[in-house]
Image: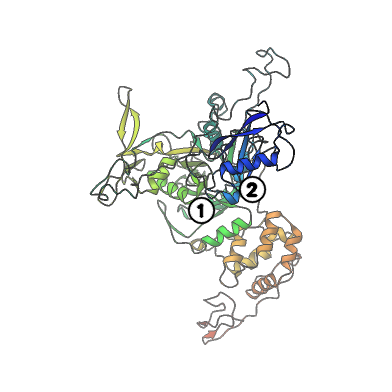
Amino acid sequence: MADNIIIRVQSPEGMKKIPSTKRETAAAFLKKVAKEFGFNSNGFSVYLNRNKTGELVSQNKTLSLLKIKHGDMLFLFPSESSTSSGEVMDTATPHTSSSLPSVSSSSSSSMIPRSFSAPQVQEDEIDQYLAKQDGKIYRNRDPQLCRHGALGKCVHCVPLEPFDEDYLNHLDPPVKHMSFHAYLRKLTGGADKGKFAALENISCKIKSGCEGHPPWPEGICTKCQPSAITLNRQKYRHVDNIMFENHTIADRFLDFWRKTGSQRMGYLYGRYTEHTDIPLGIRAEVAAIYEPPQNATQNSLELLDDPKAAAVDEIAAKLGMCKVGWIFTDLLSEDTRIGTVRYSRNSDSYYLSAEECITAGYFQNEHSNPCRLSRDGHFGSKFVTVVATGGPDNQVHFEGYQVSNQCMALVRDECLLPCKDAPELGYAQESSPEQYVPDVFYKDKDKFGNDVTFLARPLPVEYLIIDITTTFPKDPQYTFSSSQRFPIENRDILGETQDFHSLATYLSQCTSTSFLNIVSDFHLLLFLVTNEVMPLRDSIGLLLEAVKTSNEDLAQTWKKSEQWATIEQLCSTVGGQPSSSLDYGAMGGPSVPASSSAMWSCLHCTFMNQPGTEHCEMCSLPRS
C-alpha cells in the first residue's frame, strides 16, 4: 500500500487525480492520463512545470526515478491539432523574461481567463517584445535607509512594479497615465495571477438574438439593453511618446500652410519602438508624412477619396513601417514680420474640438490594437493624433493626443455628436426609433464643491482626451537619407506636381554619388509606384528592400534593371538633364524642339494636341 500514490494533473478543463504507484512507468502513467482526459496517445503533452519545462515523455523509467512523488501536480497541455477553441491553461508564472511565453505560440493565451475562448491573435512586434520583458523598476541600495548587505533587499530598495503610481507621480515631469503593458501587468498580477482578467470592449448597441420581446423600438429588456456609461479618466495609454525623426519632416509639412495660409492634414508613417523613459512604454516614431487628397481652407479641411491609399500602405509595409497616426494644422498667423502664430488652444478654450475627437475616434477604430486578452481579439488603438498649433510663446508647437476607449465606443456606435456653436462640447445622441442609445454620464463638482453626476448633453470633451508628449531627438535620425526634396504628392495648388518633369529636375539636382541616397525619398518611391505612365508596383520590391536595409549593393542591382533604364529614358525625353558628375548613368540628350501650326498626335499616347504646344496635354511627354 505504501507504493500507491496519487498524482494531480491540471489541464484547461480542470484538475483530475490519477491513482498510480511508484514503480509504474511513465509510459503506463501517460496512458492512464490519456484515458482519463479522453485524448489519443499523441494529442497532448504533460510537463513537470507550468512554463512547459520538464516534459514527461513516454519511456520505461518509473515515476520514482523521475522524482514524481505522492501529491505532485503535473500540467497537461493539448496539442494545437486537438484544440479547436484555442484555449490553453492558465500558466500563473511570474512576469520574467525567461518565463513569459512567446506571443506567437499557443501559450500566448496564458493570461486569458478560462471563461471564454481566446482567439489566436498575432500581436504587434512591440507588444510581443514588451510581453517578454521583466518591466520592474530596479532601485539602488540607499546608503542612509538600507541597513543590510550588498546582496540584501528591503522596502527602500526592492524593485517596484511598472504600475507603481508613486514612482510615476515623482518622475520629472510626472506621468499621469501608466503604459498599457504596465496596466496589463497590474491586471494579471496579484494572488490569482490574472486568472479572471479580461479586457472588454464597450458596446453601445442592443445585443442581438433576444427573443423574449419584439425588437426595438417595440421592446427591450435588461438582457439585451446596453449598460449606461459613466465617463472616467483613462488610467493608461497605448502610446506614451511621439517622436519625429528630424525637423525636416515637420518643416516640409508646414510649408503648405506657410505658402497658402490654408490648413493641411497628413498621415504619419513610421514604427512603434520601446520608450525607455516610462516602464514598458511605447513610442511612435514618425519617419514620413503622406498627404492624401483634400480640400483645405483657412478654417476647414475636407478629406477626399484616395485611390492610392492601398498602394501607400503596401509600400510602407515593405519599408518596415506602418500608419501610426495623423497630423493636422490649426495655425493662424499673428505677426508675419517676426513669424509668430496665435496661441488659440489652451485651458480657456479647448485642446481638441468635439469634431476632432470624433475624427480621432474614427481613425482609432479603423486601426485597432491586436490584443490577446480581449475576446474580440483587439482592444484600444495605438493610432495617435498630432496637432500643429500655436504655443504659449507664439511659436508652432506639436501636441499629441489620443481619445479614450470610451470615446472610441461612442464614435463606433454613432452615439457622439459635435456641438455646432461650442467646439469644446460634444453631445450624446438621444434614442430614436432607429437606434437605442444608452445614457452617458460624467462627474463634475457643483458650486458647493460636491461631486455631481451630469447627463452628457452636452459633454466636455476633456473627459475623452489623453495627452501624449511629442518630441524631436537631439541627434536627428533619417530613415530616408536623400539630401534633395522630391515634390510632395497632392500639392498641385502650389504648382508642385509629381511627374517626369519634376523627376528629371530632381535627378539633375542630385549631387550625391550614391544611388541609394538618390532614391531614398518616401515621396519619390510613392511616385515610382503610383505614376500612371510607368507604375513599378510589381517590380520595385528589391529597391524598397535596399532602402529599408540601407544596402547600396541591392540598390545598384536594381539600378541595372530594365525598369530604371526606361525611367531614365523618359526623364531624358522630357528634357531634364542630369548632372554630368553623377555615376548612375546618362539619360540621353536634350529634347528636340518642334513646332507646327496644325494639331499633332502624341507619339506616346496618340492624344491629339492643339498646335503650338511642345508637350502632350494628356501624358505630359514631349512632342518629339
- Find the residue positioned furthest to the left: 218
Give the percent coordinates (x, y) of residue 65: 75, 33
Q: Give the number of callouts.
A: 2
Give the percent coordinates (x, y) of residue 93: 61, 33
Three-letter amino acid code at the position of disc 2: Ser
- Considering the numbered disc 1 on the image, is that residue within a helix, a strand or a loop? strand
How dense is the environment of label 1, judged by Cα within 10 Å: few (below 14), some, or many (20 and up)? many
Query: How far apart are the two marked residues, 2 and 1, measured between alpha carbons?
Result: 58 Å
- Find the residue positioned furthest to the bottom: 598
Q: Residue at x 62, y 68 (%)?
A: 536
Q: Residue at x 57, y 27 (%)?
A: 171
- Considering the numbered disc 2 on the image, is that residue within a helix, a strand or a loop? loop
Q: Is 598 or 22 nearer to us in this picture?
A: 22
- In this picture, residue 395 sits left or right of residue 202: right
Q: Nearer the viewer, mark 2 or mark 1?
A: 2
Q: Is 472 or 367 nearer to us in this picture?
A: 367
User: Which sits earlier in the primary sequence, circle 2 or circle 1?
Assistant: 2
Give the quarter of the image for residue 38. top right
Check disc 1 and report the residue beneath it.
266
In the rendered image, the quadrant that contains the C terminus is bottom right
Give the percent coordinates (x, y) of residue 609: 51, 82
Check disc 2 and report the residue beneath it.
41
